[in-house]
Amino acid sequence: MRGLAMTNCDQIRDVHNSFVRPESFLADESAKRAATEDDDLFHFISYVPVDGRLYELDGLRESPVDHGRTEDWLESVGPVIQRRMAEYAEGEIRFNLMAVIGDRRKMLGERVSTIDASIGRLLKKLEAMNISPSSASTPAGGAGAVEDAEVARLRSQIGRLNVERADLEHLVELEHGKRARYRFDNSLRKHNFIPMVYQLVRAMAQKGALAEAMQKAQQNPSSSG
């Protein structure tokens, strides 16, 4: 039922279909055939931890595969994946390995918020001692060595937290930069370049350069791209 719910979700379907590569020619539906054992079937297999056990989810199997108990599932899944890859012919390299994780921007933002709260608590402690966060003066009425040490400790903690906060903000900016690159890359994946290629080939033909380019490409296929 979850699969049906995802299949019937307009937003998921629209995003998925938006990545379909444009085709210059329509395939002959009558020429399609069912896959056989000799065909290469490419699909994704998921490995997930559930209640302290490692499960393999393969759509070509009737049910999940239980790979046993695990304390650290990331440590346990490595050998399982290696065994699965070893089932294929030696030299086979057509594998993709991806990890599904949360949005790092959100995770880093939560850490920044935690640091801000910690800094706020430390500043309140300084205020309770009548100490300015940036002041070098001692509390009103004079402070003993113990109180001076406490003030120094609090300021040192605030300084370390501010450094950590700056590092996290830098990481957040890097994540925003990644998203900008992803949007650009996705726009290229979804863009239809066929009309541009058609006009380019047509212009080359009109200038008499197409035949020579094709001949060179046939002679040296490795550099034709």
Image (tube, grey):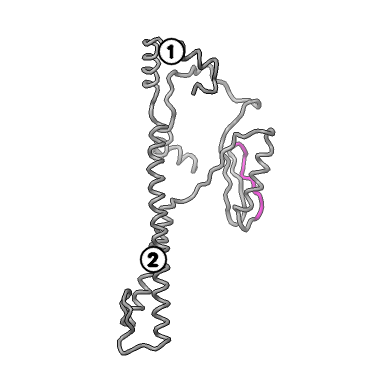
- Disc 2 marks which residue? 162
In three-dimensional space, the C-alpha distance between marks 1 and 2, rounded to whole angstroms, equals 62 Å
Q: What is the x, y in percent for residue 42? A: 58, 33
Residue 66 lies, with reference to residue 162, above or below; the image says: above
Residue 199 lies, with reference to residue 116, above or below; the image says: above
Q: On the picture, is 91 further left or further right than 30? A: right
Residue visible at 41% across and 45% down in the picture: 178
Residue toward you, 161 or 58: 161
Residue visible at 45% across and 10% down in the picture: 211
Residue 57 visible at all: yes
Q: What is the x, y in percent for residue 163? A: 41, 64
Q: What numbered label is drawn on residue 210?
A: 1
Q: What is the x, y in percent for residue 87? A: 69, 37
Residue 132 lies, with reference to residue 170, above or below; the image says: below
What range is drawn magenta here? 60-69
Residue 191 lies, with reference to residue 27, above or below; the image says: below
User: Residue type at mark 1?
Assistant: Leu
> Which of pointers 1 and 2 lies earlier in the amino acid sequence?
2
User: Residue type at mark 2?
Assistant: Asn
Q: What is the x, y in percent for residue 77? A: 62, 49
Residue visible at 42% across and 82% down in the picture: 149
Q: Is residue 64 magenta?
A: yes
Whether pointer 1 and pointer 2 mark residues with C-beta atoms closer than 8 Å, the reply is: no
- Label 1 crowding class (10 Å Cα cut-off): few <14, some 14-19, many 20+? some
Quadrant in the rendering for residue 15:
top left
Residue toward you, 193 or 32: 193
Secondary structure at numbered mark 2: helix
